[in-house]
Amino acid sequence: MTLDKMSKIVTLLAFTALIGTASFTALAKEPSLTALEETPEFKNALSIIHHHKGLSAYDKGDYTTAYQKIKSAAELGNADAQKDLAVLYRYGNGTPQNYQKAVKWFQEAADKAIRNLSTDWDAYTA
């Protein structure tokens, strides 16, 4: 087993303790790492880790690593990372300045926030 696969398994186990047993249920049905990587819980956990690593790199002035990690988290659907990626594009930190990409990612973050609010409201009023 490669170090990358081990890292993913450890990540999954750590976050499963926080989010419940849905990922272990998926493991019982399909005992492959690929199946686990497709679960929403795993993708969410991975996006949180990448976003955190990106923010840490940004704080240290390593904008290239920040961009790579935050972009990865944004592509996984993390709304906070999408907003932060837009800021990186806006100011050209870790990537060439690109206003069109900044607007795209600000819009993605806003759309995600609206969807989350709608879901939260529906759950609250049910």
Image (cartoon, rainbow, N blue to C red):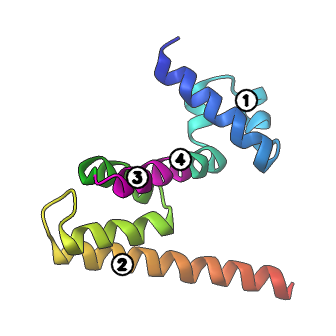
**Up/down of 80 relative to 55, above or below:** below
Sequence-earlier tag: 1 or 3: 1
Q: Is residue 10 magenta?
A: no
- Looking at marks 4 and 3 on the same chain, the residue that comes earlier in the sequence is marked by 4
* Amino acid type, residue under disc 4 in the picture: Ile
Per the image, the residue denoted by label 2 is 106
> How far apart are labels 4 and 2 at the CA level?
21 Å
- Point out which mark residue 7 bears: none
Across and down, in percent, residue 104 comes to 29, 75
Residue 53 percent coordinates (x, y): 45, 48
Distance, label 2 to label 3, CA atoms, is 17 Å
The answer to whether residue 52 is magenta is yes
Q: Quadrant of residue 9?
A: top right
Q: CA distance from mark 1 to mark 4?
A: 21 Å
- Tags 4 and 3 in contact by the CB under 8 Å rule? no
Image point 31% across, 72% down: which residue? 86
